[in-house]
Amino acid sequence: MKTRIFLITLLLISFVSCKNEKASSEGNDANVTETQTLSGQAAVKDSESDANALQVAKSIEDFSTLVAAIEAAGVEDAVVNAGPLTIFAPLNTAFGKLPEGTVENLVKPENKATLAFILTNHVAPANFPVKQLIKEAKKGRKLYMASGNYLEVEDKDGEIYVGGTKIIKTVQVSNGWIHVVDDVLVPAE
């Protein structure tokens, strides 16, 4: 299992590195505009370091809705900071489970704060690999999320659930962990 995760991570890092090198060498106006509109750590172009959570998410089509939401909320810097972070990353199918029109409404500029709050409910500002989540579940602990809320961790027949949703896959990134989930962890508030 560790070998598989390591190989997946290496493939993702290689893909992102090649993609970044290609974008840098093309030097088109779209890349210049993107760099000019972003500030902070999200604007840094680095093809030598290991991929961070946002770079990995951008390289996988199944996270395109999540990436669009992160950009609409303006929380890119929070996702690329040095961490450690643990991100419970919903797949596109998770966003598809929300009531019709929800995503379209949330990405509107006037809903930026609400969207940012929902997204930060998917980020634990700590290091939680699967082994640690199992320990937290056994102790009956909840995870503190960047939104200020807490999510319950459960071990159900050897499967780990956070906030009621099952962790499907796990990928280690340079600034922590991405745990893939198939539900959006919408805060009760």
Image: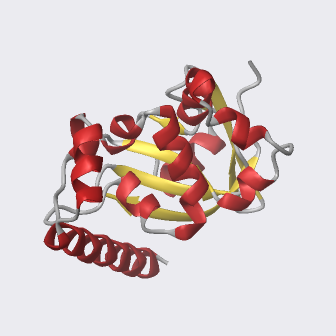
**Horizontal side, residue 55 vs residue 161: left or right:** left
Which quarter shows the C terminus? Answer: top right
Q: Position of residue 20 (x, y in %)?
A: 24, 68
The reply to whether residue 28 is in sight is yes
**Horizontal side, residue 103 vs residue 36: left or right:** right
77 or 174: nearer the eye?
77
Q: How many marks do you count on the picture?
A: 0
* Coloration of the structure image: secondary structure
Residue 128, placed above or below residue 3: above
34 or 66: nearer the eye?
34
Residue 87, placed above or below residue 152: below
The reply to whether residue 163 is in sight is no
Q: Quadrant of residue 49?
A: bottom left
User: Which residue is pictured at 64% across the width and 59% down the height?
Assistant: 91
Q: Quadrant of residue 103?
A: top right
Of all residues, the one furthest to the front in this rendering is: 29
User: Which residue is pictured at 72% across the width and 51% down the height?
Assistant: 95
Q: Position of residue 81 (x, y in %)?
A: 29, 39
177 or 187: nearer the eye?
187
Q: Position of residue 114 (x, y in %)?
A: 62, 24
User: Which residue is pictured at 25% across the width and 77% down the height?
Assistant: 18
Q: Position of residue 104 (x, y in %)?
A: 71, 41
Q: Quadrant of residue 38?
A: top left
**Horizontal side, residue 56 vs residue 99: left or right:** left
